[in-house]
Image: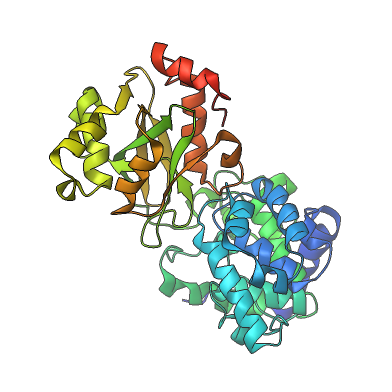
Amino acid sequence: MAYLDWSNKKIESFRKALLDWYDQHGRDLPWRRDKDPYHIWVSEIMLQQTQVETVIPYYERFIKELPTIKALAECPEDQLLRLWQGLGYYSRVRNMQLAARQIQEDFDGVMPDNRSDLEKLKGIGPYTAAAIASIAFDQVEPAIDGNLLRVTARLFEIEEDISQPKNRKVFKEILDQLIDPQRPGDFNQAMMDIGATIMTPSNYDAHESPIKAFDQSYQRGTAALYPVKKPKKKAQSQEWLAYYIVDRSGNVLIRQHQADELLAGLWHFPLIKAAHAETIKSEGLVASTFLNYFTQLDQIAEQDREDLSRDFKVFLNSDLPMVKHVFSHRIWQVKCLGMVYQGRPQDLLDQLHLQDSSFTWLTVDQLTSYPFSSLQEKIMKRIKESDLLKDEGAGRRMDEKKSFDP
């Protein structure tokens, strides 16, 4: 079905109305203040799955710390993850670093200026390649993101489901004709701004729209029906246990997630998927569940196993609310559990390292220098609010040193 039947004159009028509005009302964003392709690339990757207001301070800090592609390529992983901490979807920044190294090796350290070469870089798909090519290099490429899909669907009452990749060609055929060949980057950003501020998913501020005269859904009162989009599947909920373990000196046990785990490379209190609800109702089960999961108990002498278990003092707070964390495809409900390890800290590490070398004890001051996920920050906040280990025994030991203050 052909949706675009405008004359060349009408297309020119549309471009003028859109770009005149953009010149007056386009959003003032830090990555729009120059046409540096590196800046545009960083911003586009950060903006995936993340709101503009959240991205701005992260972007400014990232560019300050890593001002060039070379600096990104050579950045140590821990520093890189710290700069990204709180944005989530950490594969984005790992792919950025891999792409930066590709640019150093394959393109002499210079960002490619065309969509075809840009798409060869790790983590850069059709949208990001088109955005960089059009904004930084004035290539006539429509950058088709959610905003452009929504605006275009309403302009032409497009019936194809935008969640189906096969339907992108319908939108591209239209936008290939609409895009302004003299100002392709501004055209894309103007359409993005219309979608973000006027034609939002839940609202259409028609009085402020500079393109309402061209909008079929506005003229027919059908804007609420577009874009057509199949509902997402409901995210699955999972229960997890977070173990907040301190030694008698107030040092904290943390673990780095491995490459094959969710949140890889980030540090967390030990996390265990809760297979049985009874686990969090019994002090004995709390300690044994941790040991069973993270140590090779079958390789430890029976007396040593008993000594290891006895060295844990468990504190349960049945009133402590679960921490809820939403990933794109799942929801984690996390119960926080507290234990004081009263034995020799190195003895516990030795047993843990037989199976998993990613554990370490940290002082409270050292915690601030390790990269954590936003889930871990939520857990630390909940523990601080609850005074989970402020029990008669644990409280004295914690107060001998600096209290844990995430």
Residue beneath the point at 61% across and 52% down: 82
* Depth check, front residue: 269 or 304: 304
Image quadrant where one finds the C terminus = top right
Residue beneath the point at 29% across and 29% down: 311
Q: In screen coordinates, is 29 left or right of 120?
A: right
x and y, in percent, of residue 287 in the image: 26, 32
Figure check: 35 above or below 210? below
Residue beneath the point at 52% across and 29% down: 381
Q: For residue 218, say whether it is visible.
A: no
* Depth check, front residue: 2 or 246: 246
Figure check: 194 above or below 184? above
* Depth check, front residue: 28 or 359: 359
Q: For residue 90, say whether it is visible.
A: yes
x and y, in percent, of residue 140 in the image: 70, 81
Dividing the picture into quadrants, the one containing residue 126 is bottom right
Colouring style: rainbow
Task: Count every numbered label the image shows and give the total.
Answer: 0
Residue beneath the point at 71% across and 73% down: 69
Residue lying at the far top of the rendered structure: 392
Q: In screen coordinates, is 309 left or right of 356?
A: left
x and y, in percent, of residue 233 in the image: 33, 51
x and y, in percent, of residue 351 in the image: 29, 46
Dividing the picture into quadrants, the one containing residue 402 is top right
